[in-house]
Image (spheres, rainbow, N blue to C red):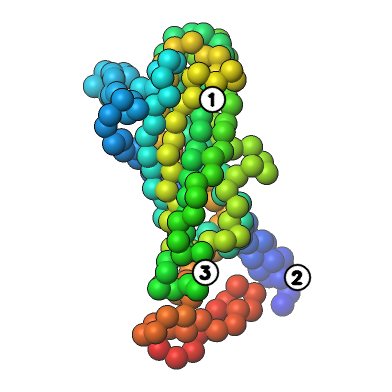
Amino acid sequence: FPVTIQKWIDGNFAHLDARTGNGWADIVSEFYTRGGPAAPGVSAFRGGIYLLEFSDTDTLEAFSNFHIPHSWRIGTTIYPHIHFSVQGNNAGVVRWGFEYTMAQRREANTTNYTFPTTQTIYIDFSVPANSAYSHFVAEAPEGFGIDGTNIDVDSMIMTRVFREPNHANDTFVGSVWAITADLHIEVDKSSWPEKHEVSTPGYCQLGKKKKGVAIVTGK
């Protein structure tokens, strides 16, 4: 190719790689509650908007379930986080907990298809003074996320999200509102080449991969 055309091609491939290479995405889940004394109440946030309210006296809990999409970069660490806001202008630390269990699909895997005993990740988030109604994101720090080596695409991660106000680390005086629970995941493709993550009877059999391209054989 002439030099000008070669540069144009190289530039476009670089731009394509920047848009389609490894990156990050969110899996967002709304909360649900099970009732009872541990369930947070719903209170007015702004105007007609209502959110779950987590007090500074009792450990309250809500739940979120997450489906691992086909775009997830297999084996990478998953980072839970919560979007929340606060009442009042006090400064202090809000301590959030993510209790979780996860499993792959049984019909498509020979291991890791039962939900094991739960594990918990704690996030201590410092709220600055004069932050009433601010939007905050409390995320598990680097290296302290959910280990992704024992799951695959189509796995489920079930979580219990709670504030632990009676822990010594939680120093924020006042209630906080939970907005959504999210997972930050690494992605390395716009889509997965198969409907199912591994070979199953009646579906396409996934052969070897080369440079991210799947070679599919059979039906």
Mark nearest the camera among 2 and 3 is 3
Q: Secondary structure at mark 2?
A: helix
Label 3: which secondary element: loop
Compare residues 36 and 170 and report the one nearer the observer. 36
For the residues labelled 1 and 2, the Cα–Cα distance comes to 58 Å
Give above or below for 99 relative to 138. below
Which residue in the structure is indicated by mark 3?
111
123 horizontally vs 28: left or right: right
Which badge, 1 or 3, is on the more N-terminal residue?
A: 1
Amino acid residing under circle 1: Arg
Residue 214 image-quadrant placement: bottom right
**Residue occupying image coordinates x 44% and y 15%:** 56
Residue 161's x, y, as percent?
A: 44, 35
Earlier residue among tags 2 and 3? 2
Q: Between residues 216 and 145, which one lies in front from this camera angle?
A: 145
- Residue on which disc 1 sits: 95
Query: Residue lying furthest right in this view?
Result: 3
View extreme (front): residue: 117
Residue underneath mark 2: 3
What is the spatial separation of the Cα atoms under label 2 and label 3, in whole angstroms? Answer: 53 Å
Image location of residue 139, percent across then percent down = 56, 35
Q: Are marks 2 and 3 in contact (CB under 8 Å)?
A: no
Q: Is residue 193 visible?
A: no
Q: Dot 2: few (<14), some (14–19), or many (≥20) neighbours within 10 Å?
A: few
Q: Examine the rendering and report whether any part of residue 75 can be seen.
A: yes
Give 9 or 191, whichever is nearer the viewer: 191
